[in-house]
Amino acid sequence: GAGVSQTPSNKVTEKGKYVELRCDPISGHTALYWYRQSLGQGPEFLIYFQGTGAADDSGLPNDRFFAVRPEGSVSTLKIQRTERGDSAVYLCASSQNGRNTGELFFGEGSRLTVL
Amino acid sequence: AQKVTQAQTEISVVEKEDVTLDCVYETRDTTYYLFWYKQPPSGELVFLIRRNSFDEQNEISGRYSWNFQKSTSSFNFTITASQVVDSAVYFCALSEPSSNTRKLLFGQGSTLHVQP
């Protein structure tokens, strides 16, 4: 497709379980970002990839969160031992080259609910 | 420290009214970028505008206009003759090139309801 694609759109899991959220960026976009949006709040930065490498992971809240982008395209956000506080919408965005022009193209998000 | 504050959490207007959404920011950097994004009910954030700190010219795009005032650290957004389709959450955001992180710091958002 033409836009950023995220799957699943909704995920309900139990506390303590492992989840993976997938992001398929716009073709050719080298920069990829993960943000987390809690109810009634603005998106919060989690991690930024330039190509295959994580250029900035300062927003990951703790070591239960991990993300990969092995071939420089699709990225997976992995959350271990989920907690209720992890419930949020996880947004993925991509941009053409990662320069600070800031025109990020966002997906519709993956809504995670931890029971 | 960086901070973005949006004064209006939620605002309701009647169609054809003008509405202004306020954004005030804090940054230590002299070079920075400011943005507005729209988030309709579908959830996908849509880019509206980018402004760099050296360009204080106001901008107009159709019914949308932006007023950047460096002296008051504000970057306000006005919708003229609002329409029901303008109903969404609007986010102001800040980016600092010197941080080299390419990340955006978003405000908490302003939810706009336009009533027919």
Image (cartoon, grey):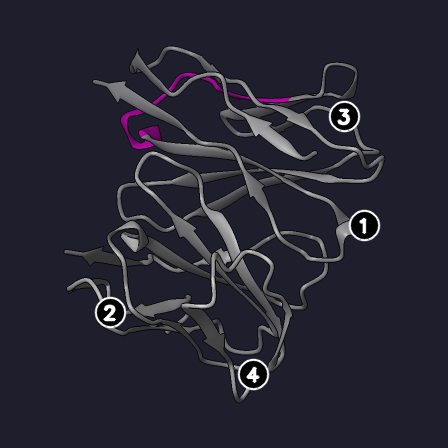
Give x and y (percent) for residue B116.
21, 18
Three-letter amino acid code at the position of disc 1 = Ser
Give x and y (percent) for residue B87.
31, 29
Three-letter amino acid code at the position of disc 2 = Pro
* Same chain, labels 4 and 1: no
Asked which quadrant contains residue A12, the reply is: bottom left
Residue under numbered circle 4: A72
Provide the secondary structure element on which disc 4 rests: loop
Residue under numbered circle 1: B98
The structure residue drawn at horizontal position 69% and vertical position 57%, both measured from the top left corner, is B101
CA separation in Å, label 4 and label 1: 25 Å
- Which sits earlier in the primary sequence, circle 4 or circle 2? 2
- Which sits earlier in the primary sequence, circle 1 or circle 3? 3
Residue under numbered circle 3: B57
* Residue A81 image label: none
Relative to the observer, which residue lies in front, B48 or B95?
B95
Relative to the observer, which residue lies in front, B104 or B52?
B104
